[in-house]
Image: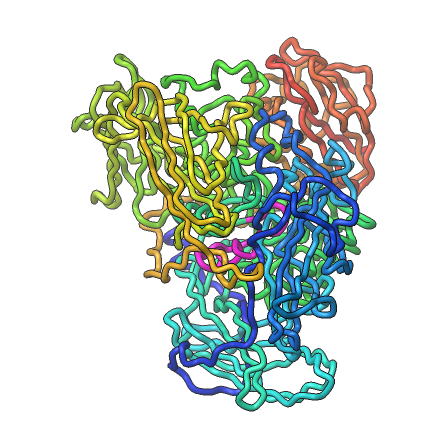
Amino acid sequence: MIKSFLHNFKYTYVLLVLTGLVFASCGSQNKNVENLPKKNRVKYNFNPDWKFIKDNPENAQNPSFNDESWSSVSCPHTFNDVDTFDNLSLGHHNGEKNQWRGTVWYRKHFKLPSTDSHKKVFIEFESVRQIADVYINGHYLGQNQTGFIPFGYDLTPYLKFGENQENIIAVKVNNDRKSDNFRDNDPLVWNHEHWHPTHGGIYRNVFLHTMDQLHITLPLYDNLKTVGTYVYAENISHKNADVTIKTEIQNEYSKAKKVTLVSSIIDANGKIVQTMNTEKTVAAGEKSIVTATASITNPNLWYTRHPYMYKVVTQIKEGNNILDSYESPLGIRSFEFNKDSGFWNNGEYAKLHGWGQKPTNAWAGLGAALPDWLRDFTYRMMDEAGGNFIRWGHCAAAPSEIDMGDKYGFVTLMPGVSGESQDEGETWDIRIKAFRDMIVYYRNHPSIFIWEGGNWAETEAHYKEILEVINTYDPNGKRLMGNRRADVKNDSEGYVSIEIGTEGWQREYADLPIIESEYCRDEAPRRIWDKYSPDDNFYNNPNLSKNTYKFGSETFAVRQADHWWNKMGKKVYHSGGANWIFSDGTHGGRCPTEVTRASGEVDAVRLPKEAFYALKAMWRPEPQVHVIGHWNYNEGTKKDMYVISNCAEVKLYVNGKLIGTDKEPENGYVYKFADVEWQAGNIKVEGYIDGKLRTSQTKSTVGKPVAIKLTPITGPRGWRADGSDIALIDFEVVDKEGNRCVLDASRVDFTISGPGIWRGGYNSGKANSTNNLYLDTEAGINRVAIKSLLKAGTVTITAKRKGLKDATVKIISSPIILKNGLTREMPQVYNEPLGKAEPLPAHVPDMPAYSPEKQNTSKLFSKFSYTGDAKAMLRTTLDWGKKTYTDLEYNYTVIPGYLRGAEYIRTPDADKRYWARDLLQFIAGVDMDIYVGHDDRVARPEFLLKDYNDTGDDIDLGGVKMSLFKRTARAGESIIMAGNSDGDTPEECRMYFVIGKKH
C-alpha cells in the first residue's frame, strides 16, 4: 500500500531553488517593503491603441505612411478571432485549416517626454505569431520567427523625445505556413494547425522599458544578447537557505561609475527579510555579472500544495541616487524525481497530476489573443480541479502563465519550440536559439522543474548542444532535461535525465525517473450526456461514423479514472503526468462531429465537462464525491450510475432511500451502481473514510424552462476600456426555482448596445456558430464574450427566446489612463493572498505491491512503445493458436512456416481507426525482418507503402484476409508506424499486427 510504503521509505533528495534576483553582504531584516525608495526604471504597458491592416501595403514601415484608414486595435490581438472554431474537424488528427493566412501590418504612434532623452528605451514582445519584422521610425530592427518566445530591441538610437515628437513602431506579421502537410513545413515546423492553430498577430503583451544608462539588463537574449538576473539556492532546509544571485549590469555612460547593488528579499507579507549590498566599479561601456550570496533563516519553502513566493528587489545606487531598480520572483524548494518512488518536494512525496495545454490557449470567439486574466481564469480552474502539474505542448507558454505556475503550485515541463520531428539545418538553428532564449527568460521561476529539449528524439550532436545551453545559462538550476519520444533513438542514452512518456503503457528507461507528457487522448463534447438523454447533434450526426470516439460526457468522465489509474496513478515509481489536454481547441482533432479537438476537461469557452468534476473528485486532497451526469430522465429509465470519489466507500440514495453501498471501486475511484431506476426527486451520494461520513453531493430533477439567466464575469479589476479586455456572460435556461435546465439545447438571441464588440461563443457541433448574435445552449448553459473599446461606458445585453422570460445585464467598462500611447496600468490577473497549505490527501486507493520494473527483455523490439488508446503487448515464439490481438479472441491458425518461432506484437483491435504519427515504435535490437499484416479493406498507410514490400502471402484471421508486408531493419534503426490508415477507415476492418524475426 502506498501509505505504508511512503511511511517507511528511506530517501535522499536533490536540493534546488529558483528565481529571482538578490545580492551580497547581509543587512537589516523585518522592515516593511514600503520603506524602499522609489525606483527609477519605468515599465509601460504598450498594448493599447495600435493601428492595424489585414493587408501588405508597400512602405508601411515609413513614418510618413498614412494609416488613418486602418483599424484601431489593442494587443493582445489576433486577426484570426473571426475565422476559427467555425469549421467541423477534418478528423485524422488534422487541425483547422480554413483560416486566413498572410502578411499584415501593425503601427503604433507614441511620444516620450524630453526628461527621458538621457535614458535607454527597450521594447519587449512576449511573442508574435509567426514571423515579426520590427521597425522604429523607419529603421529596421530585426526579425523573430519563434512565435512563442519573448524578444526585444533597443530603440534608443532611433527615438525622438518631447511632446511634439511622435515615434512610430511598425511590425510586419506573417502567419503563413509552407504546406498543408505538417511533415513538409520547414523551417517553422511548429507553426502548423496540426500542433498549434495558426492564429496570427501580436497575440501576447507588449511592454516598453525606460531605464538609466547604467542598468540591470533584461533577460532578452535574442537581439539584445542580455541575460538579466539569475538566482539559485543551496543547502536548503527548513532552517536555512543559502541564496546566490548573479546580476548582469551594463554601463552605457562614457565614463566609469562606482555603484552599490542593494538587493532586498521580501516575503509574501511585504516584509524585508534580508538585504545584501555589493559595491562595484563599472567601466564605461562595460557589461558584467555581479555575484553575491546571503542566507535566509527559517525560509518558507515552495510546495506544490503551498507555493510560497518571495520577491527580490534589486537597486543600483550611486551614492544616495537610485539609478535603476528591478524586481524578480523567488521560490525556494528542493526536489527529486526518483526512478523507484516518484516525485518528492522538500522531502515530501507528491503525485503529480495535471494537464498538457497548448500555448495558444485558444478560446472560441477570441482565438489565441487573451488578456492575462483569462489565462489566469483557466489556471484557476486547473487548480480547482486538483492539478499540480502542467506540460506546455510543445512550445513555450506565455510569461503570465509561468507566473501562474509559480502562484498555483504547478510543476512545469517547459519546452522551447518544437513540432514532432528531429530537425536539421535552419529549423534546428532556430529551435536551439529559441531554447536558449527561453531558458534565459524563464530560469528564475520555481515552478519549472524540467526543460523539454524537444517533442521528438534528437541526434547525439543536438543533445550536446541542448545540454551546453542548459549548462551555460542554468548551470545551478539542477533541473532535469528530457525529450518526449526520446526512446526512438539510441542517441538519447546518457543525455536525457528523465523519461518523458507518452500514453503511459510502457516504461522505456528503467534507470530514469518518468513523467507522462500526454495521456488520455479521448474526445467527447460537453453537450452530450449519455444515450439515455436527448441527443444534440451527435449520435444522429452523419459524421459520427468518421469519429474515432463515439461517446458522450458520461463515458468520457468515467474513462478518466481508467486512463489515470492504470497508466500512472497506481504505479508507485511513476511521478505522474499530463492529461491531454485541459481545454478544447482546433488543433489535431479526431472527431468530425465537432469543431474542436474535444479532449479537454473544459470546452473552448472553459465551461466544465463532467470529466472536470471527475478529475477533481480524484485529485483534490480533501474528500470528494461526484455522481456523473444529471437526474432528469424519462419514466421507466433504468441505467448504471457512476460515482467518482477519492473516499474509501460510497453510498447512493434516491429520494432518501439507500440504493447501494460500494467499498470496492474500479480503477481506484469509480463506484458503479447498476440499473438504478430513475424517479423524480433527487439522487444523493455520500463518501466515507474509515466508516465516517466525509462529504456528500445531491443532484435534483429540475422543472420546466421558464426564464433566461445572465451572469457577467470580468477580471479582478473589472472590465477595462483598453481595447482588448474581455467580459464574459454566461447564459442559462432555468426553471421557476432558478435551477439550470440541464437538458436544454435551443437557440437564444441577443442584442447589444454600447461601447463593446460582440465576440460571441460557439456551438461545439455546428459549423459557423462563432461571432453570431445568437447561440444555442448546451446542457442548459453557454458562454459569450464581449471585447472592450478604448471608449469607456455601459454595454447592455439582452437575451431572448420565445416562450421564456427575457434577461438583460449591463456591464460598465472603466477608463484607463492612456497618454501619448502609454499607460502604466499593467494587464490584470488575480492577486489573492496565499492561504493555508492544502492538506495531504485524505485517502489514497490501495496500490499494487511495488518491485522495480525490469527492462524490456526482447532482443528484437528494444525501446518498444505504443501510444494508442488501448494496450499493446510483446510476445515471443509465434505459432498457430497464438492470440493476435489484446482485445479479440482471434488466433493465428495457418501461418507461413518462416514465421514460426518469431517474436510478435499483440495490437489492440480497438485502435483500428485511431491515428497517431508515432502509434507504434521500437528500435531494432538486431538486424531483423519486420512483417506487418494489414487488412485489405483498409487503405494502406504511407509508412507501409513507403517502407514495406508485399510478400504475396496472406494470413487468415477469422475469415479476414490480412496481406503480409515485409522490410529489413538494421540493428539500431528506429522503426515508427502510424495508424491503420492515414484516411477514413471503414467500420468493419481489423487493426494491423506486427511480427519480427532475426535476419
Q: Which residues are magenta?
A: 391-413
**945, above or below 502, in the image:** above
Residue in view at x 56 percent, y 73 percent: 41
Q: Is residue 437 above or below residue 753?
A: below
Q: Is residue 626 visible?
A: yes
Q: Nearer the viewer, residue 580 or 235?
A: 580
Residue 869 position within the rendered picture, expressed as x and y whole percent measured from the top left: 56, 31
Image vertical order of residue 271 relative to residue 47, above or below: below
Magenta-drawn stretch contains 401: yes
**Residue 528 at what x, y percent from top left?**
42, 24
Q: Residue at x 61, y 87 (%)?
A: 259
Image coordinates of residue 605 in percent, x first then y, are 47, 37
Q: Residue at x 67, y 53 (%)?
A: 453
State the quadrant of the C terminus: top right
Query: Is 242 in the magenta?
Result: no
421 left or right of 676?
right
